[in-house]
Amino acid sequence: MSYDEKEWNLETETLTDFFTAMAFLQASFALEYTAECFYEIDDKALKFITESYSNKGVSFKQWTEGIEFYGNHEDEVILIMGNNQLFYSSNTEEHFLEMDKILSKLGTEF
């Protein structure tokens, strides 16, 4: 990753991790049920998410100050950007509604 094309920083440890993280990123916007907006979250909300949902095991370290992926089901993705922006989606209505009931109350829409 580079912002100026002069200094380059490693985004992921392996190409497989990069492709997996990119798949989660793309899925978060392409799954059938998605949040209608990004939410701005605070440290308390971030802590709740990291303690309540499973880390997907891959992330982007540099881009947009880092992107982490969480979710307790295979068909859902919770995206945390820069430790203060939240977006989530699922391929099943049931799992989306479970997340939405909780996550939509954690932050401020923007």
Image: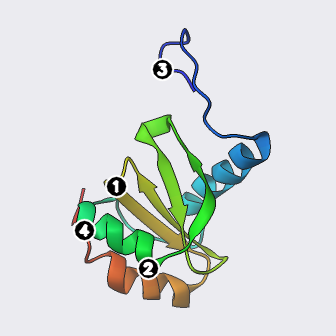
Separation of disc 3 and disc 2 at Cα?
A: 33 Å
Asked whether 4 or 13 is in front, the reply is 13
State the image quarter where residue 84 is shown: bottom left
Whichever of labels 3 and 1 marks the residue nearer the N terminus, that label is 3
Q: Indicate the quadrant containing the N terminus: top left, top right, bottom left or bottom right.
A: top right
Q: Earlier in the sequence, mark 4 or mark 1?
A: 4
Identify residue type, mark 3: Tyr
Q: Residues within 10 Å of mark 1 (few under 14, many from 20)?
A: some
The amino acid type found where label 1 is placed reads Gln
Residue 95's spot in the image, x, y percent? Answer: 53, 86
- Left or right: 67 as drawn, with respect to 14: left
Q: Hey, which quadrant is residue 41 in on the image?
A: bottom left
Which of the two discs, 3 and 2, labels the residue nearer the N terminus? 3
Disc on the earlier residue, 3 or 4? 3
**Residue visible at 54% across and 21% down?**
2
Q: CA distance from mark 3 to mark 4?
A: 30 Å
Determine if residue 41 is in view. Answer: no
- Asked if 106 appears above or below 8 in the picture, the reply is below
Measured Cα–Cα span from mark 2 to mark 4:
12 Å
The residue tagged 2 is: 52
Q: Residue at coordinates 26% horizontally, 61% vertically from top-left?
A: 43
Kind of element beneath mark 4: helix
Q: Secondary structure at mark 2?
A: helix
Q: CA distance from mark 4 to mark 1?
A: 13 Å
* Residue at numbered disc 4: 44
Circles 2 and 1 in contact, beta carbons < 8 Å: no
Image coordinates for residue 106, horizontal then vertical, percent: 26, 73
Disc 3 versus disc 1: distance between alpha carbons? 21 Å
